[in-house]
Amino acid sequence: MPDSAQPAPTAASTDPAALGVMQGVPPPPDKRVRSVDGTSWRFPNTRWSFSHERELGPSAVVRRGPGPAAALPYSLRDDLDAVTFTTQDGRSMTWGESIDENFTDGLVVLHRGAVIYETYRGALQPHVPHLAMSVTKSFAGLLAAMLAHEGALDPQALVPTYIPELADTAFGDATVRQVMDMTTGVRYREDYVDPDAEVRYYGVAAGFSSPPKGYDGPTNIFDFLKTLKKQGEHGEAFAYKTCNTEVLGWIVQRVAGRSFAELVSERIWQKLGAEEDGYVMVDSMGFAMCGAALNVTTRDLARFGEMMRLGGVFNGQQIVPHAVVADIASGASKEAFAKAGYVTLPGWSYRNQWWVSHNRFDAYSARGIHGQACYVAPGAEMVIARFASHPTAANGNGPLDRVSLPAYEALAGRLTKS
Amino acid sequence: MPDSAQPAPTAASTDPAALGVMQGVPPPPDKRVRSVDGTSWRFPNTRWSFSHERELGPSAVVRRGPGPAAALPYSLRDDLDAVTFTTQDGRSMTWGESIDENFTDGLVVLHRGAVIYETYRGALQPHVPHLAMSVTKSFAGLLAAMLAHEGALDPQALVPTYIPELADTAFGDATVRQVMDMTTGVRYREDYVDPDAEVRYYGVAAGFSSPPKGYDGPTNIFDFLKTLKKQGEHGEAFAYKTCNTEVLGWIVQRVAGRSFAELVSERIWQKLGAEEDGYVMVDSMGFAMCGAALNVTTRDLARFGEMMRLGGVFNGQQIVPHAVVADIASGASKEAFAKAGYVTLPGWSYRNQWWVSHNRFDAYSARGIHGQACYVAPGAEMVIARFASHPTAANGNGPLDRVSLPAYEALAGRLTKS
């Protein structure tokens, strides 16, 4: 329970440099963020660790390759901080205020391909990759859709067609399409604050979270997936469960015969003209957490979003087939999505691991807890790449969405007026 | 004890791709290399893992920065494989044969700055960083010498001047110079095959090696160093002990107020025009193993050696002061070195964490177990960067030296004749 005598933490009061987090050689004991004792997951340490994930565990490079970085033209605007909007819970706020309100670490806004707004706070810098959390899922979904477009993967096939090891699990009679759109019926609680939820054991198996005392369960992602049982029916409702993405990652990697990190590098990052190598945290066997653990720079995430906005074209080439982008942008069943009960996301849908708003800007986005986002708004010719370290992971991004979604729409509104 | 009925392993018989090591999604259980059970340190798995260290533990980036890579001109020669030499144990061998004899993973030879020989074997590729082992030490020594040259660090000062935490340890009355040249008297056995040697517990504290059952000792490098006790006198004899480098790394990082990875990046890698980011494995608190854990590409190590050969100048700038390079190249006391009893290194000395041959080519080198080397031979205008995964770490590089040192000299001899 929060101590009501304590003021609520703010971005300023939890700034890692001001707090002295990881300052000194070595830092004093109470300022250490460590890989082995859970300190790296404790707020406000997360304000530092989300920008230093590779220093806390094994990772695989997402190589940018030898080419030059794709130029990002700058056309910074000083009128955006004053853009006003009303939060979903009725507060009046400016765009400038919303940045720290949501514990933003890095933010790049593109309009017609030019950087119109850019800021770095906390421990993040322009050249430093930040943990993208579930934004990672949208990369896995994109790769799956690309393989399907090429005919290498059949979305209508049952999962065991590609992964016989999952025949006796919840996924035994699920289609790849159901996994891609997260409409499987599987017993898996995606509750980030319940220590007994399956998502916690996923993190433990992947080496991302500290194991409870005496843990003797799976120690890699594949073995974890083999433990999952069916609950309900497939294909009836959207239910956000990271295990789907890990199954999809398994399928994608097996079909392509390449690791997730290699696929993102070879098919996207090297073509995109990324400024910096990205990376993905891996389990004890070296395999990526396809659902949670990509780390890239804010600018490179913006380039990625711009490529999506332009129908798959960026840096002088068609990187993702136009049809794949169009399929994502058009979304899926709003009815199936509504069953998940997201009060902050009315009328949305979920397609190929992307969140589709169906708003007046046709915006769709990759989203991760604690405030990670790649928000593509074709109707406003706008892309927002944002990394954050918001204190709460409760209710997904609900508490942030109440601020950030109206903020994004207000910004899009301003840009379509100018 | 080796089974005399088993043929000795060769580079060909232990090729990781041919063996299927880490092939498949996931690999079969007997082909897995894991971070948690010691499999990553078991030969022949090391033939894979030395090229995949970051996938096995936490690491910090040694960033190359945004500039272009410094061009390496190519002038490949096809006459070098036939160069013949006699090993220190009396066998006649060709340069070409020596490559696999020493389980080479990557090798680049520069002559007058041009690549005259290049090969990649095993799991290594041109763009992939390889574990440099104790070659890392020479980077730490170089940084210390640079700080001393700038007046930021006094080699004659006692260690506790900079690190009061070490006042009651073996290093309490040692000078920085004695640490730089490894002439301290400290109880620390650098025996890589003795499971009770202190070097093993250094690896455990740093998270590099699996802890023995029930281990409750230090869990970071700094705490480990605080446990070391004096044995013998300082300043009398060279004794190769990695703990000296970790003390030096602590000093360097505290004096500069930057991490080892940042220092290598800012002072060397970014200026060098490296092709790829390097990285260094870090302990559970995010601090580098300055004595063992740098990973860079073979070509970038060659660029680094060429910079040393040219008196600190490379890529159009003075990267390391000429006086610092000259001090290393001229070596230290051969008498102090001889007391260490290296039969394969007659007449050598050790200066600022570099091994100085005093041979007819004035060669000096950075050296790491299992066959890592950056061999600079000014008298032959030659630089050799070599990574390897030789099965043995016994007696340092003794078994390899018997082959590789005569091979290097034979190559230098050929180049000075042409």
Image (tube, coloured by chain):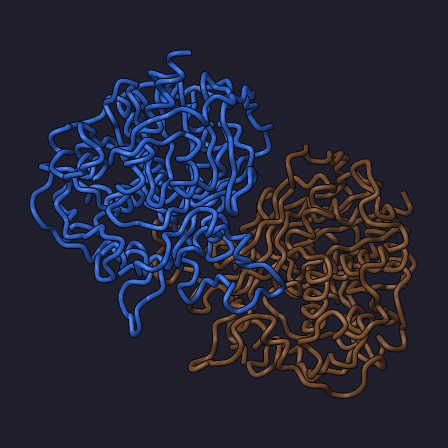
Chain colours: A brown, B blue
Left or right position of B185 against A150: left
- Image quarter of the N terminus of chain A: bottom right
Q: Position of residue B340 (x, y in %)?
A: 15, 39
Task: Tell me which corner region of the image, top left, top right, bottom left or bottom right, holds residue A175.
Answer: bottom right
Residue depicted at x 70% and y 72%? A163
Residue depicted at x 53% and y 73%? A204
Residue B263 vs A16, above or below: the answer is above
Left or right position of B91 against A371: left
Residue A286 vs B66, above or below: the answer is below
Residue depicted at x 10% and y 41%? B234
Q: Position of residue B115 (x, y in %)?
A: 51, 23
Residue A102 vs A313, above or below: the answer is below
Residue depicted at x 18% and y 30%? B346
- Which residue is most to the top? B418
- Which residue is most to the front? B5
Q: Nearer the viewer, residue B371 or A405?
A: B371
Kindly tell me whether residue A15 is visible in this rendering. no
Task: Tell me which corner region of the image, top left, top right, bottom left or bottom right, holds residue B89.
Answer: top left
Left or right position of B46 against A369: left
Q: Position of residue A212 (x, y in %)?
A: 46, 79
Q: Position of residue A313 (x, y in %)?
A: 84, 43
- Image quarter of the C terminus of chain A: top right
